[in-house]
Image (cartoon, grey):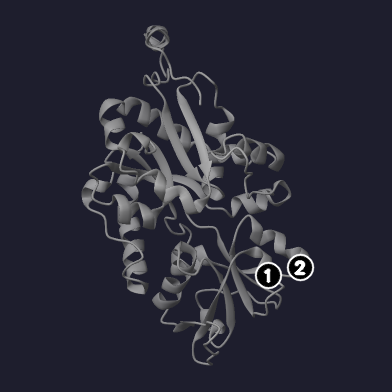
Amino acid sequence: MKKGFVKGVALACAFVCVGLSGCRPSVPDGEITVYMPDGAPALALAKLMHEDTEDDGVTYRVVDSSLISSKVTNRDAAKNADVCVLPVTAAAKLLGTGETYKMLGTVTHGNLYLLAKEEGAITAENLSTLVGKKVGVLQMTSVPGLTFKATLSSHGIAWQEVTNEGGMVEDKVNLFAISGADAVGVIEADYFMIAEPAASAQSKKGYSIVGNVQTLYGGENGFPQAALVAKNSLLVEHEDWVKSFVERVDGASAWLTETDGQTLVATVNAHMDDRTSETSLKAPLLTQTALAGCGIRFTYAAADFEEVNAFLTKLLLVNDKATAMPSENFYWTYFEP
């Protein structure tokens, strides 16, 4: 763990900033922890991690996606992340009252794609092509699966989950759960729905991207996928630092287009919370095409809350236990400068 700024250094930095336009606010005393799940959310903050230094007072930690919720729910509040990225569904369900955390914004807007061997694009106009077909779906009960189900439902297309006990039907889209991209080409299916950066790489197996789930869901803006939240105490005591941090996150996506896969993987690996583990990201897969398909861009909560609420409403129609509608108090009211 890095050492936080001592008061003398903080005061010295503040003194230097006097009279200088555009000077970044001093980092608060002590250590600020920023947690994020591995994968596209980690890429969203990769530039900040790449610029991380030993004496900046901030520690970035990347964890397995299955652990990220535990970083905001510890009974000892001091052990929870000061800032955290987690699925918007989990953020709303766990923190939606706004009593302990507020949502600063959205860092990813969907990275899901339909793959097939047969030619022919799947669009909103011909989505019914999937009826009667077998579709392998990544993370069936989490955001990817829920989003795909909500997308089908919003277009009036019936679907069912196929289990080992269930059978295929001709009048619905038949969805079955897959664990990841490794299933593509191994398990028999007409289509697969998986995420970038792995989706583009499936061309080596003879599969191509035939559908963009973000576009199918709701047009060019995709859907709010990963939320950035911060402790209320941090917002109260160090709001200037939070504003500066968010502005850096807002500008971080452009850096990805200038950075190679090896650098990105090394950056994430250097910030793994478990030092014995490595990121699931693979350098050869982090092409510019794949990165562009990850939906990484920042939108402020004050401007994005209606879209978030609409998304959560659609998911609740699919599974009323999957998330929760947050209160107005959950959203940070600061607008983009």
258 with respect to 294 (left or right): right
Viewer-side residue, 22 vs 30: 30
Residue at 36%, 31% in the rendered image: 243
Q: Is residue 249 visible?
A: yes
Q: Can you give x and y, in whole percent of width and height, for residue 5 in the image? A: 43, 16
Q: CA distance from mark 2 to mark 1?
A: 8 Å
Secondary structure found at label 2? helix
The amino acid pointed to by label 2 is Lys
Please say if 66 is above or below 310. above
| Disc assigned to residue 205 | 2
**In the image, what residue occupies the spot 22% across and 44% down?**
99
Residue 137's quadrant in the figure? Answer: bottom right
- Report the residue marked by disc 1: 184
Local packing at callout 1 (Cα closer than 10 Å; few below 14, some 14-19, many 20+) is: many
Look at 31% across and 70% down and name the residue there.
320
Q: Which of the numbered marks, if any, corresponds to residue 279? A: none
Placement of 10 over or under 90, stated as above or below: above
**Label 1 SS:** loop
Quarter of the figure with the C terminus: top left
Residue closer to the observer: 29 or 312: 29
Q: Are marks 2 and 1 in contact (CB under 8 Å)?
A: yes
Taking 154 as reference, is 330 left or right?
left
The answer to which image quadrant residue 238 occupies is top left
**Residue 43 or residue 183, whichever sits in front:** 183
